[in-house]
Image: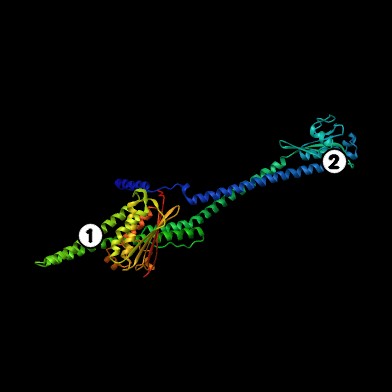
Amino acid sequence: MTLSIFRQSGELVTILRNRKFTNPLKSLRFIVFCSFLLLSMLLMLSFSMLVQHSYNDRMVKQKLTLVQNQCNILGNQILVNQFTMDALRSNLNVQIDQLANVWEGRILVIDPNYKILKDTYTIDQNNYIIYDEAVKVMRGENDRSIRMVDDYAEVIIPIVNAEKVVNGIMIATVSLHDIEDTNEYLNEQMHILLMLFLMLAVMSAYLISKIAVSGLNRLNGQIRTLNEGHLEPLDAKSKYKEFVELTESFNVLLNKMQVLEDSRQEFVSNVSHELKTPITSMKVLADSLLMQEEVPNEMYREFMSDMVQEIDREGKIINDLLTLVKMDKKSSALNIAPVNINALLELLLKRIKPIAAKRNIDVVFESFREVIGEVDEVKLTLAFSNLIENAVKYNNDGGSVYVSLNSDHKFFYVKVQDTGVGIPEDSQSQVFERFYRVDKARSRDTGGTGLGLAITRNAILMHKGAIKLFSEPGEGTTFTVRIPLKYVS
């Protein structure tokens, strides 16, 4: 029992160690969730503050307008009574006291001589008051004055007669506690709304984040299926353009991977076949010799000659394969140096002309200018040599090969044109693949391994160059090579 518990504990520890705990900050869904939630809260808080501020300003403005209107009414009554103390002690006096109580504040009535005729607090009554705001309103410089002091508002209103002449002023100090109480109630209600909105925002953020990554999760599930070995195109059906484009791009990549895998398998098959064929031929020749007694010297020499040819062919295939392997390595170094391309091509043509002459093939070289390029002479010689040799091998007897060299300020261009058998259109995209032959029987007769153009393309790509072909069956083939004059690593 104890051993079983320990064993299960050990398995649990192993699982926990092997399990990868992802950082939520690196989760797209988490980021979308937090971003939407944060944006929603910022909008709601901003709206709440704006509403509260607008409401407070509006309430204060309405109350001060009400105070000013009521003070104007009282001022008209004071003018009718001509600021007499008797009148102020009458019903008007009571109205002023009642209004001060309603406002929870203080009202002062001041005559043109700045004497306080009425103070609801009775503290400064019959005294004089002079300060800047009161003087400016009394002189008519300001139509009113408002000053905020703590939780109170002080309003100075002129007492104006029918001729718009200021005959006195009223100073009303009004409490704003009722507005603050209303603001507190509004804040409580706003907090409740914020909590409700927060709950709604959390649910919305959850749904939006789930919807935003649903297509990605589905795509990820399909990719996991691919990892299990089911190489099937991904389903591009989605509501969102970005996921459709991503799926289509992945399908293109998947197709390329499939083509690459097929090419790899075909390459392995071709290598096996190409290397096995000479060995099989040699074994057949050797068995034929062993099965016969007293083989004539002539037959013996003929068989041995055939075996030597097969050995040479095997060696050539191996050498070409090694050349391709070296060029495929990312670390493959280029021995870059300034090379006279004119002299390089002339030397190659000098070597190939005797072979071409045996079949009456005319080889012409045309150079428009002297070209000095920064290249690897060995690898580029191999590339151009393959192109020119192919132009001769797959040419018709009595045909011609035209080689030209030109350049501009950035690149130099080499064109190899022949009048040979040409390449069918459906084969032109495959001629640079390894071991691919348009006509397998003819290639064997000419001694080709099917690796020459693959080596040529790799050598040109290593120089950051490009190679293109144009061909019409029965009319010939033209290869055009473009390579930078200055090598850029």
Label 2 crowding class (10 Å Cα cut-off): few <14, some 14-19, many 20+? some
For mark 1, does the 10 Å Cα neighbourhood hold few (<14), some (14 to 19), or many (20 or more) residues? few
Residue at the far top in the pictured view: 127
Q: Residue 48 bears which disc, if any?
A: none
| Residue lying at 53% horizontally and 55% vertically, measured from the top left | 208
Observer-side mark, 2 or 1, equals 1
Indicate the position of residue 200 as horizontal and vertical percent values. Answer: 57, 52
On the rendered structure, is 374 left or right of 80?
A: left
Query: Where on the picture, by quarter, is residue 123?
Result: top right
Q: Report the amino acid beneath label 2.
A: Leu
Q: Residue pushed farthest bottom?
A: 474
Residue under label 2: 74
Q: Horizontal and vertical percent for residue 35?
A: 54, 49
Which one is earlier in the sequence, the residue at label 2 or at label 1? 2
Looking at the rendered structure, the kind of residue marked 1 is: Asp
Question: Can residue 296 be seen at all in this image of the molecule?
Answer: yes
On the image, the x and y values in percent for residue 149 come to 73, 35
Quadrant assignment, res 389: bottom left
The residue to which callout 1 is attached is 312
In the image, residue 92 sits, relative to residue 234, either above or below, namely above
Which of the pair 367/70 is nearer the observer? 367
Q: Position of residue 476 (x, y in %)?
A: 37, 67
Image-quadrant location for residue 295: bottom left
Q: Is residue 443 above or below residue 158?
A: below
- Report the residue at 30% width, 55% height from top: 323
Q: Residue at the location (71% across, 40% down)?
A: 177
